[in-house]
Image (spheres, helix red, strand yellow):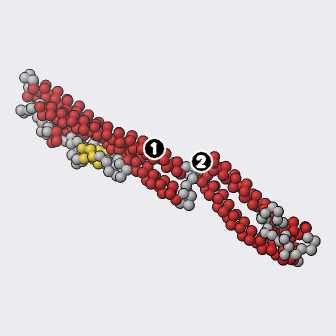
C-alpha cells in the first residue's frame, strides 16, 4: 500500500483524500479505501465532539438565561448540595424574622390597649379622690359611680376585645405567646398580660360604699408591670428580627458565590463555543466534498 495511504485529517505532513487524488492520476484503490476507513472513524469522532459542543452551548445558554452557574447536579453536584442547604437556612431565617416582626406587632397592639387602660384607671382614681372628699353628697357619689362604671366597662371591653389575627391578647386566654424566631422553629416565649377587671382586682369597685383607693393604685401598678414585660419582649423581638435578617443576608451571599453566574465570563465562553462550532461546520462541509470525490471515484 502506498505510503500516502494515511488517516484522513491527521498530521500536517500526511495527505487528505483530495490531495491524494490530485497527486495520483491512477489512484491505488486500497489506499483510497484506507483513507475512507480512517475518514469514517473520524466522522464518528467528529459526531461525538459535535454532540459535546452542542451540549456545551446549550448548557451555556441555560446558565445565561437563569443567571446561575449551577442549575442541576450535573453542573456541580457538591455545590448544588451546599447551595440547597444554604437556601433552606436562608428561608428559615427570613421566616423567623417575619415571625418575630408579626409577634412584635401583636405586642404593640397589646401595649396600646393597656395604655388606654391606664387612662381609664387614672380617671377612676381621680374620681375616687373626688368621692372621698367630705363635701361629696350621696347623690354626688352616685353620679361619680355612674362614670366609674362606664370606665370599668371600658377596661373590660378592652381586655376582652383586644385581638391580633383573631386571637385574644389581654383576656387571660393566652398565658404565653411562643415565637418561632429560630431557623429550627424554636424561639422565645413571651408572657402575656391579663387586663380583665378580675385580674386587676377592681371588679365591683364602688365609691358609694366603703372603698379603698389602693385597689386602683394596685391595678395601675399591675398594668405598668405588664407593659414593662411586653416592652422587654418587644425589644428582644426587635433584636431577633435584626439578627435573623443580618444572618440571612450573609447566608444569601455565601449561596450567591456558589450559584450566581459571572455573566461576562459566560458570554465570552458562549462566543468561543459558537466560533468552534462554526469551524466544525466548515470542516464537515469539507469532508462532504471529499466524500463526493470518493463516490465519484468508485462510479
Vertical side of 120 occupied by 188: above or below? below
State which mark lies toward you, 2 or 1. 2
Task: Please provide percent x and percent y for residue 98.
Answer: 39, 45
Residue at the spot 26% in from the left edge and 34% down from the top edge: 115
The furthest residue to the top = 135
Q: Secondary structure at mark 2?
A: loop
Q: Which of these two is toward me, 104 or 7?
A: 7
Q: Earlier in the sequence, mark 2 or mark 1?
A: 1
113 sits left or right of 281 in the view: left
Vertical side of 140 occupied by 183: above or below? below
Q: Which of these two is toward me, 39 or 192?
A: 39
Q: Which of these two is toward me, 33 or 1?
A: 1
Q: Secondary structure at mark 1?
A: helix
Q: Which of these two is toward me, 287 or 182?
A: 287
State the residue position of label 1. 249
State the residue position of label 2. 262
Residue at the spot 32% in from the left edge and 42% down from the top edge: 106
Task: Please provide percent x and percent y for residue 105.
Answer: 34, 41
Vertical side of 83 occupied by 243: above or below? above
Vertical side of 297 occupied by 13: above or below? above
Give me the C-alpha separation between circle 2 and circle 1.
Answer: 20 Å
208 sits left or right of 62 in the view: left
Residue at the spot 27% in from the left edge and 44% down from the top edge: 190
- Residue 51's quadrant in the figure? bottom right
Residue at the spot 67% in from the left edge and 53% down from the top edge: 270
Q: Is residue 268 visible?
A: yes
- Residue 130's quadrant in the figure? top left
163 sits left or right of 129 in the view: right
Task: Please provide percent x and percent y for residue 209.
Answer: 7, 33
Q: Residues within 10 Å of mark 2 (few under 14, many from 20)?
A: some
Amino acid at each position: 500500500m502506498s505510503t500516502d495511504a494515511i488517516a484522513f485529517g491527521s498530521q500536517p505532513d500526511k495527505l487528505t483524500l483530495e490531495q491524494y487524488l490530485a497527486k495520483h492520476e491512477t489512484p491505488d484503490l486500497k489506499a483510497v479505501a484506507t483513507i475512507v476507513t480512517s475518514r469514517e472513524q473520524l466522522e464518528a469522532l467528529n459526531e461525538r465532539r459535535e454532540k459535546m459542543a452542542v451540549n456545551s452551548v446549550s448548557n451555556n445558554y441555560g446558565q445565561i438565561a437563569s443567571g446561575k452557574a449551577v442549575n442541576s447536579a450535573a453542573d456541580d453536584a457538591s455545590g448544588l448540595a451546599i447551595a440547597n442547604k444554604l437556601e433552606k437556612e436562608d428561608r428559615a431565617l427570613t421566616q423567623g424574622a417575619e415571625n418575630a416582626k408579626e409577634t412584635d406587632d401583636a405586642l404593640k397592639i397589646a401595649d396600646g390597649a393597656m395604655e388606654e387602660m391606664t387612662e381609664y384607671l387614672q380617671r377612676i382614681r381621680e374620681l375616687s379622690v373626688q368621692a372621698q372628699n367630705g363635701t361629696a353628697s350621696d347623690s354626688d357619689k352616685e353620679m361619680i359611680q355612674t362614670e366609674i362604671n362606664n370606665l370599668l366597662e371600658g377596661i373590660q371591653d378592652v381586655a376582652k376585645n383586644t385581638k391580633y389575627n383573631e386571637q385574644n391578647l389581654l383576656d387571660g386566654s393566652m398565658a404565653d405567646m411562643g415565637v418561632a424566631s429560630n431557623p429550627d422553629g424554636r424561639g422565645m416565649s413571651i408572657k402575656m398580660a391579663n387586663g380583665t377587671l378580675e385580674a386587676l382586682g377592681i371588679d365591683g369597685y364602688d365609691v358609694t360604699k366603703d372603698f379603698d383607693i389602693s385597689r386602683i393604685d394596685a391595678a395601675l401598678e399591675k398594668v405598668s408591670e405588664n407593659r414593662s414585660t411586653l416592652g422587654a419582649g418587644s425589644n428582644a423581638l426587635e433584636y431577633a428580627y435584626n439578627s435573623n435578617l443580618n444572618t440571612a443576608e450573609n447566608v444569601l451571599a455565601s449561596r450567591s458565590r456558589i450559584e450566581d453566574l459571572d455573566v461576562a465570563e459566560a458570554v465570552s465562553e458562549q462566543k468561543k463555543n459558537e466560533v468552534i462550532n462554526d469551524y466544525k461546520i466548515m470542516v464537515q462541509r469539507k469532508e462532504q466534498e471529499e466524500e463526493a470525490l470518493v463516490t465519484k471515484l468508485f462510479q
